[in-house]
Image (cartoon, coloured by chain):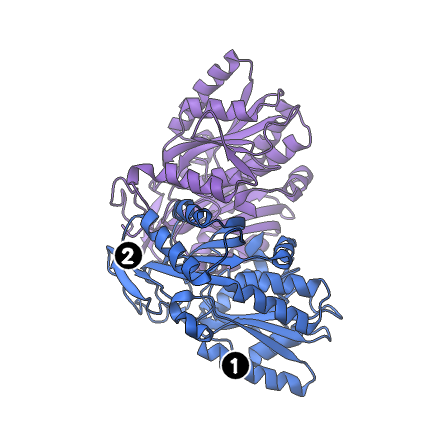
Chain colours: A blue, B purple
Amino acid sequence: MQRFINNPDEVVEDTVKGFVKAHADIVRLSAQNPRVIAARHTPVNGKVGVITGGGSGHEPAFIGYTGRNMLDAVAVGELFSSPTAKSFLDAAREANGGKGVVCLYGNYAGDNMNVKMAIKLAAKEGIEITTVVANDDVCSAGPEEREKRRGVAGEIFMWKCGAAKAAEGASLEEVRATAQKAIDNCRSIGVGLGPCTLPSVGHPNFTIEPGTMEVGIGHHGEPGVRVEPLRSARDVAEEMAKIVLDDHQLAAGSEVAVIVSGLGATPLNELYILHDTIESEIAGRGLTIYRVYIGNYFTSLEMVGATLTVMALDDELKRLLDVDVQCPAML
Amino acid sequence: MQRFINNPDEVVEDTVKGFVKAHADIVRLSAQNPRVIAARHTPVNGKVGVITGGGSGHEPAFIGYTGRNMLDAVAVGELFSSPTAKSFLDAAREANGGKGVVCLYGNYAGDNMNVKMAIKLAAKEGIEITTVVANDDVCSAGPEEREKRRGVAGEIFMWKCGAAKAAEGASLEEVRATAQKAIDNCRSIGVGLGPCTLPSVGHPNFTIEPGTMEVGIGHHGEPGVRVEPLRSARDVAEEMAKIVLDDHQLAAGSEVAVIVSGLGATPLNELYILHDTIESEIAGRGLTIYRVYIGNYFTSLEMVGATLTVMALDDELKRLLDVDVQCPAML
């Protein structure tokens, strides 16, 4: 493995240490739990707390989205594994400003289970936690089973809009509803060109043959809907846009926000090459791009590939997207 | 090649198209030259223009640093190749607000030659171009031959400080002097773990054997000072810090700014793991980190590896680093 690590079993430990050192002006490690990152200024009295949590290896997600007008606290899991219930609970404690906490997380079995347990534990100490479960990954289940879909990079929009709403002083239910609307308005698709390796395992846990691509791949290498010969970036981008936009069914004239994220080892220039076609496809359907993020926003270790996320906007979501944030992933 | 491209000979063309579409609120393509990116608001009358140029494949460098309080215009070369003299000239034309233009670029043979030609051509039409040549790459020549060293990620600090100085209304000579001071205060080192492939070539033009690392590697795979067995991130980071700081010879109590950049295919978590030790090494010498940037700031296609840049600060450089910028690489 050609990587910069120490003990393979301490990758998360070492990542968190370096992260907190690098961004000590924005974040801090919870004094109670070395697997919880909190914004420096958190908790804010009278503000709804906004938290998430998820497995490591997706950096800058999840920890990089902690900060001002963004997440108040994040529960940190091992590589590709859910944080513990205790870590979700401690994140809620860090974020609790007395108006309750909304936990905005992705639809994975481990996270679902641990968040549920954390809700019960928090209730015992008087902290109300409500949730929104992200399910923006189009290829992970059909349109009639949207609740089964996984959460992927659309979570970034869910966090940004939910956190900005909380910063405006909204109630727990208002923040939850806005975050729910944000993720309901998101559709995402991933295409994988190369696998990744968990350092403690030492070899990839899935394969992508050279000359092929996996359409609809998940953030942990979950199988996509099909393996195809790798085609031109133009063809790939057209297919990604078609899958997302066909599922979306937006009226012409709608405004959207877009994320084109690398999965870790795909160079930035290739994301721009994809975006050249993605933009044309979106415009071709009569949609207008209000804002676009291109880069490594939600990764899977050194997986080769890219994801596309499209969020339909209304006036509220545009206003919330426009709110300035201070977080390590968006400096 | 597992990559998102169309015609291998049109990678730069397609990258630039996607880039301009994505960031049309900040940048524009020159109407005169499809290999020149300019900031939307450029030129600014009465402001010194600040430009750079370099080969493509280092994204977000160079084009991503175009914007407000940053570069006014950038000449775009083919992959790993200097822009033409004409492109440097056209970048100067785009940036010219009547007070002259400073070209802040890296020490490579092609760039040196083409910038020199551009200076002569610009002089004929009354545009004065002065230059600063970056040479922050410690391993590319010994301390007695600093002028032979290549420019690498320290260029980002040179651009940021030079451009902020120009935005303050400084004269051509003042901007040049400040940018020169910024790069004089920078030292960088790269460590490579895996090679990269020019799409039109189809195979890597250098090799890094599994289990080894190349210490001092350049941004185009230029040989480093030695090939060693790959060691722990802690050992690698210590070595990187030692090489940079031994060359720097800063007095205890000095403040520094730091960039830990991935070379393209190294995941962000590994950069944080490196930074955990880098920070300790810097602090261990009695130095204080004023600001740190961690991410893919200056890459080499999908090379695996990382670079460390340390800039010594004074009050002026701190003030200039603090200036808010709006550019695609620092959103």
> Closer to the camera, B292 or B118?
B118
- Of badges 2 and 1, the one in the foreground is 1
Q: CA distance from mark 2 to mark 1?
A: 39 Å
Determine the residue positioned at 32% across, 62% down: A195
> Closer to the camera, A28 or B91?
B91
Name the chain under label 1.
A
Coordinates of residue B221 in the picture (x, y in percent): 34, 42
Coordinates of residue B118 in the picture (x, y in percent): 46, 20
Kind of residue sitting beneath label 1 = Asn
Q: Label 2, on which residue?
A: B210
Coordinates of residue B303 in the picture (x, y in percent): 36, 49
Coordinates of residue A247 in the picture (x, y in percent): 43, 63
Kind of residue sitting beneath label 2 = Pro
> Closer to the camera, B87 or A233?
A233
Q: Is residue A220 above or below residue B91?
A: below
Determine the residue positioned at 35% across, 59% down: A191
Q: Is residue B186 above or below residue B124?
A: below
Evaluate whether residue A41 shows in this view. no
Evaluate whether residue A283 shows in this view. yes
Q: Label 1, on which residue?
A: A114
Q: Which label sits on residue A276?
A: none
Label 1 secondary element? helix
